[in-house]
Image: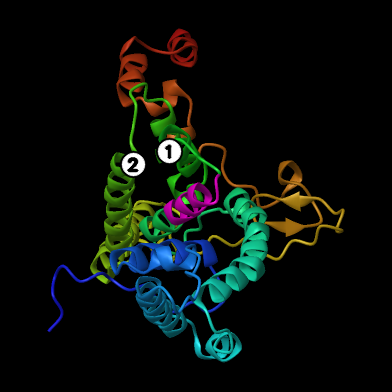
Amino acid sequence: MANASDPVPPEKFNGTNFKRWREKMKIFLTTLGLFSIIFDSPPNEDENEPARTCNLEEFKKKDYLCRGRILSYLSDPLFDVYCTLKTSKKIWDNLNKKYGIQDAGMDKYTASQFLSYKMVDTKPIVDQAHELTVIYHELDLRGTCITESLQVACTINKLSPSLKDFGLSLKHKTEEMSMKTLLSAIRIQEQHLKKDNEQIMNPEFLTKANFVEGQNKTYRFKNSKFEKGGPKNKGKSMKPKHQINKNDRRPICYNYEKFGHMARVCRMKKKKYQNYEHAPPQLSNPQTNMVLSSTGPTNTDDRSGAA
C-alpha cells in the first residue's frame, strides 16, 4: 500500500505539453533525491583514492536510478528512442533540445486558441468556462501572465448568445469580481435557463397553452355574427340570391333582384308604406290619427253641410 508521503509520479510523456511534464518530473526526481545527478559532474576515476571510487559508484547508482525513472515515464514509442542513451543527463538534454523548441511554437498556438475561443449554447456553459480557465493557466505556464481581472473580463466577453443579457448586467457592476465568483454566477444562471427550458418543453405546459388558445378562438367565433351556421344566421346564407356577373351592364331591379329595369320603373312595385316602420311619423302614430279625426269636420264635410 502506497504511503501518503510518497511522491506523486507524473503521467507518461507522449510528445505534447512538454513543459508541464518537465516540471512534474523535476518535482518527482527532487523528492527522490535524484534530480541533482543530471547536472552534477561525475567524479574522476582514481585507483589511488578509494573515497573517490566510492563516490563514483554512488554517482553511477543514482544516475542509473534517475535514468530509469525518466525512461519509465515516457510513452512506449519515446522509450524505444531514448533507451539507447546511457546517462540521465543525455536523455534530459535531448528531450529539452527536441520538445523544448516544439513547445515554444505551442505558445503561439495557445494564444491563438485563447483569442478565437467563443462559447456556444450547444455545450454546458460551466464546462466551457473551465476550459477557458485551463487556457489561462497554460498561458501563465508559457510566460504570458493574465491578471484575474482580465480573465474575468475576457470570460464575460466570450459568453454564449443565450447569456448575452446576463453578461451585460455583469459589465455594469462596479465592484471587483473574482473568477470563482464569476463561475458561481454562471452556474446559477445556467440552472435558471435550464429550468425555464424544461418548463417550456413540458407536455402539460404545452397542453394548457393550446387549451387556453383554443378557448379564446372558440369564444371569438361564437360571438361573431358571421359565424357559419350560428344562432343569428341559422338557416341563412350570406351569399347573394342570384349570381351577379360583373361584366353585365344591365340595370338591376332591387324589388325583385332581376335584370332589365330599375326599381323606380318597376310595374310590380311594392306599396310605398308597406313596411310600417318606414311610414312617415304622422301615419305611423295612431294617436296622431285620432287627434286629426277629432278636431272637427273636414272641408268636404263643410261643403256638404252648406249644401
Residue plotted at (66% across, 52% down)? 268
Quadrant of residue 98 in the image? Answer: bottom right
Q: Amino acid at mark 1?
A: Val
Q: Main secondary structure of the magenta part?
A: helix
Residue 229 in view: no
Report the front residue among 159 and 95.
95
Nearer the N terminus, badge 1 or badge 2? Answer: 1
Residue plotted at (33% across, 53% down)? 190
Q: Which residue is mark 1?
A: 152
Residue 117 position within the rendered picture, expressed as x and y whole percent measured from the top left: 57, 54
Residue 95 position within the rendered picture, expressed as x and y whole percent measured from the top left: 59, 72
Q: Which residue is mark 2?
A: 182
Q: Residue furthest front?
A: 48
- Left or right side of 295 for 145: right
Q: Amino acid at mark 2?
A: Leu
CB-based contact (under 8 Å), mark 1 and mark 2: yes
Residue plotted at (79% across, 51% down)? 261
Indicate whether residue 135 is drawn in magenta: yes
Residue plotted at (81% across, 56% down)? 260
Q: Which residues are magenta?
A: 132-143
Report the front residue among 284 and 174.
174
